[in-house]
Image: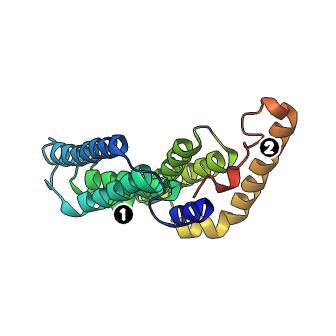
């Protein structure tokens, strides 16, 4: 019977047991997150650099991120929910700063930063879940951040030529650099053994990001 209850509990969207203390903490978390969105929205709209004032759609994106993140932290205990929530929250913030004119650049020009935001969100959500750095969290996060930064000069028109022409010509170099990075990671791990902090994952690592 106990095993069946555990299975039913883990199969649902609510995996964290709720009691008076957790409900209180969840209410405080929800209020805090809502105040963060409201504060950011009004500060952006009142900024001296804002040319378009208050813009609604980025706030809706951030609100969706808060809902997903809140559910992941308070009820589901799911890194996927936390990642999606944080990614939407940060992406919405970037869109808000862009749409209101605070950044001075349109989203069309800074869209590669959304990839970097995804990398940061993936890293933070992985750290929140397992409370330590894991190789399957660190390296994809770095790759996304670097990819976004690498594409940014093209979208910002800081370099001659366009992105399509660059990728079509230099994609073998990207494959080469990816292989070199993997080889370097292997050599570092082999050389440092257990001193290398990402050499071995603790037991249960396969199910941590869920």
Compared to residue 112, the image places residue 32 above or below, namely above
Compared to residue 209, the image places residue 4 above or below, namely below
Q: Nearer the viewer, residue 175 or 165?
A: 175
Residue 32: x %, y % from top left: 26, 42
SS at badge 1: helix
Mark 2 → mark 1, Cα distance in angstroms: 35 Å
> Picture quarter containing residue 168?
bottom right
- Nearer mark to the viewer, of 2 and 1: 2
Q: Nearer the viewer, residue 176 or 97?
A: 97
| Residue under numbered circle 2 | 184
The residue that appears at 70% across and 50% down in the rendered structure is 204
> Picture quarter containing residue 207?
bottom right
The residue that appears at 48% across and 66% down in the rendered structure is 12
Query: Quick one: label 2 or label 1, which is nearer the N terminus?
Result: 1
> Picture quarter containing residue 98?
bottom left
| Residue under numbered circle 1 | 108
């Amino acid at each position: 019977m106990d095993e069946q209850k555990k299975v039913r509990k883990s199969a649902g969207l609510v995996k964290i047991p709720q009691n008076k203390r957790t409900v209180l903490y969840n209410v405080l978390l929800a209020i805090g997150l809502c105040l963060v969105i409201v504060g950011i929205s009004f500060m952006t709209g009142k900024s001296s650099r804002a040319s378009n004032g208050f813009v609604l759609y980025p706030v809706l994106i951030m609100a969706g991120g808060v809902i997903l993140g809140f559910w992941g932290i308070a009820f589901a205990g799911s890194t996927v929910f936390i990642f999606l929530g944080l990614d939407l929250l940060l992406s919405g913030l970037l869109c808000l700063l862009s749409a209101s004119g605070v950044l001075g650049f349109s989203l069309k020009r800074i869209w590669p930063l959304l990839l970097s935001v995804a990398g940061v969100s993936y890293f933070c959500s992985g750290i929140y879940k397992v409370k330590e750095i894991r190789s399957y969290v660190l390296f994809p996060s770095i790759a996304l951040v670097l990819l976004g930064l690498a594409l940014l000069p093209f979208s910002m028109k800081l370099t001659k030529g366009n992105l399509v022409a660059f990728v079509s010509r230099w994609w073998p170099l990207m494959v080469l650099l990816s292989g070199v990075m993997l080889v370097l990671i292997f050599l570092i791990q082999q050389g440092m053994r257990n001193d290398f902090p990402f050499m071995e994952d603790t037991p249960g690592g396969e199910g941590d990001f869920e």
